[in-house]
Amino acid sequence: MTSHSQTKKQKLSVREMIDHKKNTKSLSTITEKLVPIILFLFALISILTTVGIIYTLLNETIEFFKQVPIIDFFTGTVLKPLSQNPEFGILPLINGTILSSLIAMLVAGPIGIMAAIYLSEYASDRVRRVLKPMLEVLAGIPTIVYGFFAFTFVTPILRSIWPSIDATNILSPGIVMGVMIIPMIASLSEDAMSSVPNSMREGAFALGATRLESTFKVVIPAALSGIIASFILGISRAIGETMIVTIASGSSKNFTFDITESMQTMTAYIVEVAGGEAPAGSTIYFSLYAVAMTLFVFTLIMNLLARYVSRKFREEY
């Protein structure tokens, strides 16, 4: 009787284990099916956000072009949105944006690439661990601080050297923007050069090359895709900069190539219009979105160009 009872209990125990395993397997199957869906929804958030931004910009930009001819907007050299006879030519803003970005790259490019060469090829591991974080601290400084630095420190120095320069000009913010994007170019370029195998350097040394020759004839050509991509991303960052140019370049909508004069960039114009002077539904209000759409296209082209260059010139080791 006891043996029969024990056998029955064992059968029940085995049955319970089987049922428990089935329930666990069922729960695991449901979880495995739900997890990809949840992750897909999280990934979809960024895509939907981008679609929402594009829809908003396009919708308001179309309203603007119903009131202002698109040819006049992209070919006009006069921007007077608040005059009695308003004119909406974007060329002064594009001109200011491109000039400030070029000045920034003339500052950041040489300094950034030289810093990257030192960190990658000449600095010891100990020095690199100290200098690279210190260099990247520049990237963490708020851009509004850079703006006041350009207006209260750099501009007075430039005026002491160059008395004819305006109190607000495009040169000063361009220089400071260059300082701001040095960490981006230096860090990305250093990463690209550090990824070049040491065997390539050792091969150059074995052929009698100096460290400098090895750097410029072997390492930099091998890391060219990453270096070019860092430059393009730096330009994209400069084009989208807001507070530095808003504070230090002024609000004069001049179409000129004189970097000592006050100019306005696309981002500075957006800040000005968004400040509350433009009533909702007015032409100047819609011009904000047309300029923002143009800026969006600029930065999108820069990012696509950076990806193309990275893939086109990528070296496989």
Image (cartoon, grey):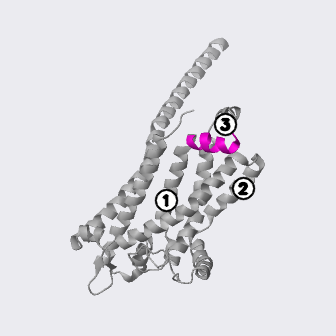
Q: Residue furthest bottom?
A: 84
**Disc on the earlier residue, 1 or 2:** 2
Q: Horizontal and vertical percent for residue 243?
A: 52, 72
Which residue is the extreme one toward the front?
208
Image-quadrant location for residue 264:
bottom left
* Residue designated by label 3: 201
In the picture, the disc for residue 131 is 2
Q: Is residue 111 above or below residue 21?
A: below
**Residue 115 vs residue 80: left or right?**
right
Task: Kindly tell me whether residue 190 is visible in this rendering.
Answer: yes
* Identity of the residue drawn at 58% across and 24% down: 17
From the viewer's perspective, is the residue at label 3 or at label 1 nearer?
3
Q: What's the residue type where badge 2 is placed?
A: Leu
Q: Residue at x 52, y 44 (%)?
A: 225
Across and down, in percent, residue 171 comes to 52, 73
Element class at badge 1: helix
Q: Which mark is residue 235?
A: 1
Alpha carbon separation for disc pair 1 and 2: 24 Å
Q: Residues within 10 Å of mark 1 (few under 14, many from 20)?
A: many
Q: 10 Å neighbourhood of mark 3: few (<14), some, or many (≥20)?
A: many
Mark 2, secondary structure of its residue? helix
| 280, 114: nearer the viewer | 114
Q: Is residue 138 left or right of residue 122?
A: left
Residue 200 position in % (x across, y down): 64, 34
Which badge, 2 or 3, is on the more N-terminal residue? 2
Check the image and report above or below for 207 versus 262: above
Check disc 1 and give the amino acid type: Ile
Q: Nearer the viewer, residue 185 or 139?
A: 185
Q: CA distance from mark 2 to mark 3?
A: 23 Å
Mark 3 and mark 1: Cα distance apart in space: 30 Å
